[in-house]
Amino acid sequence: MAETYRAVQYNQTGPSSVLTLHERELAEPGEGQVRIRIAVAGVNPTDWKARAGGTYPGALDGWHMPGQDAAGTVDAVGPGAEGLEPGQRVWLWDVAYGGTEGTAQEYAIVPAEKVQPLPDGESFETGASLGIPALTAHRALTASEHGPARLAPGSLAGRTVLVTGGAGAVGHAAIQLARWAGAQVVATVSSGEKAALASAAGASAVVNYREQEVAAEVRRIAPGGADVIVDVNVAANIRADLDAVALGGTISVYAGTGDETVSVPVRPAMGKNARLQFLLTYTVTDAQKHDAVAAVGAALADGALRVGEGHGLPLTRFPLAETAAAHDAVEAGFVGKVLIDVAD
């Protein structure tokens, strides 16, 4: 009898109840592929949005497994998959994008290039929290025409970065990566509790946008303004962003509800020679993704990426059988990172 394992699947889009737990037969990795025994999987907003029908509404052609991010160990290596060996601890990125294999399962067969080493001192929770948030943050921080294309220690020295929504998963990663690269980081939040999280992540200054004028505070801290703004809600923030951004600065936009529009005041934007850069980590160029993966790996090796409430990113965990509840938690706006404990 073939060996089986548990996987969460869905064959039609809709509410989280379409997710069901199945037994699948264990397959062997093919050319250039690696089979991973997943320990912890991360849940991102795009997971529930795709499941709800944001990408392919209605019935699907076959079963899909949700989940882009995870961490675990290499279980088997296919021919041509270089540099990886069974037992090696790794983190994964973009697993479900463009295919049907996700990370909400006990084993996943993925292309070797989507498998990255996880340092022995790092937890699977950290590895599963990278992926979409950290790669998105890297692109947002490197969208400026002034570079750098790849973050490294000192590459943002002398620059000021404004991170709106500093208590979110992408905001958290942007704060940590910007600090690792040498920037001064200002973060905005909506409460005292979130301010504590942004500070724990490493923000140099935190602004409560419900009580303070963001642009005035940014210019008090950095008179020249913010060189890069990593923005979670540009439709609401565009005027404050343009007031806060430096001459020639960049506003990186990485999130949206899907139906909002942005009204840009043209003269203020022209006067700042401002760049408005929209981004989606799945569709960046191969070079941009390569730089992001490499930089996140280097920051991880340097101990610059940390998770948990003490580091500004609270964790909440669900067993694999409760993946639907994990999706609901992300959709409801849980502050922090939602994880699935896949391994028993």
Image (tube, rainbow, N blue to C red):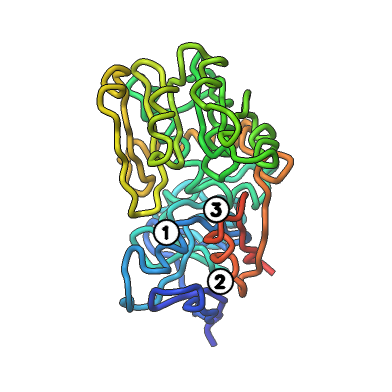
Where does label 2 land, which residue?
Answer: 324
Residue at mark 1 to residue at mark 2: CA–CA distance: 28 Å
Tell which tag, 1 or 3, sits nearer the viewer: 1
The residue drawn where x is 37% and y is 21% is: 249
Residue at mark 2 to residue at mark 3: CA–CA distance: 33 Å
Q: Is residue 11 above or below residue 293?
A: below
**Residue 4, image x and y in percent?**
55, 80
Could you tell me if residue 26 is visible in this image? no
Q: Which mark is residue 203?
A: none
Residue at mark 1 to residue at mark 3: CA–CA distance: 12 Å
Disc tally is 3
The residue drawn where x is 35% and y is 63% is: 54
**Residue 33, image x and y in percent?**
42, 59
Tell which tag, 1 or 2, sits nearer the viewer: 2
Three-letter residue code for mark 3: Glu
Query: In the figure, residue 145 lies in which quadrant?
Result: top left
Which of the marked residues, 1 or 2, is nearer the chain's N terminus? 1
Q: Is residue 221 above or below residue 46?
A: above
Image quarter of the N terminus: bottom right
Q: Is residue 286 left or right of residue 214?
A: left
Which of the marked residues, 2 or 3, is nearer the chain's N terminus? 3
Three-letter residue code for mark 2: Ala
The residue drawn where x is 66% and y is 44% is: 307
Where does label 1 land, which residue?
Answer: 33
Where does label 3 land, which residue?
Answer: 85
Three-letter residue code for mark 1: Gln
Q: Between 81 and 336, which is closer to the camera in this rendering?
A: 336
Q: Secondary structure at mark 1?
A: strand
Q: Secondary structure at mark 3?
A: loop
Q: Between 95 and 84, which is closer to the camera in this rendering?
A: 95
Q: Between 228 and 87, which is closer to the camera in this rendering?
A: 228
Badge 2 density bin: few <14, some 14–19, many ≥20, Cα 10 Å? some
